[in-house]
Amino acid sequence: MSLSLVDFTKRLVRFYRPYFALSGKGAGRSISMVAIFACNIALAIVFSFFNASMTALIGVLEQPGLTYSAFFGAMATTSGFIALNICISIVKNQFIQHLRKSLSYAVDKSFLNKWVKNKAYYGLKFVPKKIMTNGENEQELNPAQIMSYDNAELINTVTVLVDNFFNIMCLFAVGLIGLYTLSEPLNVVLFSLNFAIPGYMALGTVFYALFFNVIINSLGQPLKKYEEAARNAQGILYRKSHEIITYAESIAFLRGTKFEYRSIKETLKDTEVFKSLATKIRLNLNLITNLHLEMGFFLPVILALPNLIAQKMKVAVLYEILPYFQSVVRFLTWKNENYDQIATCEVSLGRMEKFNELLGAWENLKEKSHPQRLAHRHKSGTNKVQIKNVTLLNTEGDPLIKGASFALTKGKVTLIQAASGTGKTTLLRAIADLWPYLKKGGEIILPDNKKAQFIPQDGLVHHQGRTLLETILYPENRLATKKEKNEIIDLMIRAGLRSSIIEGLQVAKDWKKELSGGEKQRIAIISAIIKKPSILFMDEATSGMDHKTKEKIEKLLKEKLPHTAIGYIDHNPSNESMNSKGFTPSKETHFRDNTVTLKKAHQYKKTLIRPKN
């Protein structure tokens, strides 16, 4: 076996080892694996007896004066071994099906827990760039493709390959012993010296298999590289297509059709080139493999010829030699005969390993930031949100906001303002326990984290095939009460939403495309009002509204959430004016009770670089 196959096997074992155990749910998979191996040992033993029974059957047919009783007796023995082979194969197949299903579900569940439950879907953006790319070109990893296509393809193919390898390995042992036993010592005269080579048929079979390996390796080595390149090009194509759909309107407005066409065309061309090269290699491999199959019927006769000429072996024994020969050759050429499948598995395994590495990197990052995340304290006895001496860091460890201290009081509205790029949104992420980079020493105290509601800049989460009512209740997966429906309709009317939106409240469609930016923001705010949070944070939640609509929404928030502590970020707050020093309130509005101004940790100076004369 080549080093590549050994390395691939080690990677498989390392990746799947956590899903096998001696107790618990992993015990069932361990038992299935042991049972598959045991069944293959049993099949190899049956194979040996079957070969011997076939030789005996042919010997009976060659005997003069053949009787029906002798023939049917020999046939009954052979048929018995065939039936036993079928029974063991059926049992083995059941264990394989259980292993496939159980392992596929376990891997999917593990990935799902790490990606969604552990918030890696959000946290991967904080993983250092060098881990994301690993020194290679950055590739987009699609979790849906990995958890469905890659995982299913890898497990289905690997279970077949592992079972096949176990089977071939057991048959190899039987075949090698059989060839050695059936080989009479071959006498060779060299320089007047006589040599006797025991088991020469076994040695000849091994030499032929190794020679075939050398030829097939030289042809098949580039296949993995082209398979990976083709899969990567397909991933890039998927990403570009997704970007075109996502930014369709912007691309159309900016007249980017030709640019996107050329970009997609170039990627398609790369994909076809790599696919073509991989196909060419496969065709050559198929040609060599077909020649190998034809030689598999001819070479056993050549190897047995010395014993046949010396009349040390009966012709009937050839029927026993042929299966043994094929068993030995198939084991030594197993990798090359399955090269295509192994190359595909290596690509899928590589993507799954990379995804697993990223999920692990996020978990490590959370562990390292654990002391900082402990800065969050939930005290039911207080009615204030307290930010005490909080210093935020960026992903490189440099300060963004230094020593922020303020409080949000129950029933009061506080505007959080600062120059663009200071880190206002990052502060909200830290309060929501979504930002792992905080300096030790600060505290973020929430009265009740479960009753805190956050409206991010793109605040509407809508899944296709769901109604607008379900979107408003998200993430709760339940039916709205009659009282809630009436309240939502009243809020929609007062927020100035179109009648077609109100009438379509319980219609399932892609509302994210149907609604304008300001309408999405109003729906997000209505969703927050319905949930009656004790704390509400809003990040530019009214930026898509005109001042008249904005005043309506602010009035609704004051009226419907009189006991809620509200903190909001707004670059264009009501009744604000801008002077040379930045945003400063001209007067307090009826909505805002307090204003907090954040400052950058460091001011950066601009340096003008002049060209040399």
Image (spheres, grey):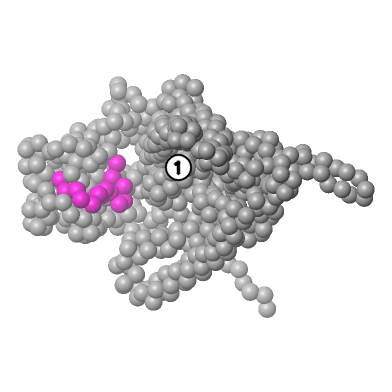
- Residue 139: x %, y % from top left: 49, 55
Query: Left of 72 or right of it: where is 181?
Result: right
- Residue 48: x %, y % from top left: 57, 34
Q: Quadrant of the N terminus?
A: top right
Residue at the limit of the structure toward the front, as seen here: 65
- Span colored in magenta: 454-469
Most common secondary structure along the magenta stretch: loop
- Decide whether residue 233 is among the magenta residues: no
Task: Answer whether residue 145 is visible to the viewer in this image.
Answer: yes
Q: Residues within 10 Å of mark 1 (few under 14, many from 20)?
A: many
| Vertical relation: 291 (above or below) 416 | below
| Vertical relation: 58 (above or below) 603 | above
Query: Left of 460 or right of it: where is 431?
Result: right
Q: Camera-side residue: 268 or 448?
A: 268
Q: Camera-side residue: 190 or 396?
A: 190
Q: Residue at x 36, y 74 (%)?
A: 257
Mark 1 residue type? Ile
Task: Answer whether residue 36 is visible to the viewer in this image.
Answer: no
Q: Camera-side residue: 340 or 353?
A: 340
Q: What is the secondary structure assignment of the residue under circle 1?
A: helix
| Vertical relation: 445 (above or below) 475 | above
| Vertical relation: 274 (above or below) 74 | below
Q: Quadrant of the C terminus?
A: bottom right
Residue at the limit of the structure toward the right, as seen here: 192
Q: Residue at x 47, y 40 (%)?
A: 159
Q: Residue at x 39, y 73 (%)?
A: 261
- Decide whether residue 458 is among the magenta residues: yes
Residue at the limit of the structure toward the bottom, as seen here: 613
Q: Camera-side residue: 349 or 205?
A: 205
Q: Which residue is mark 1?
A: 155
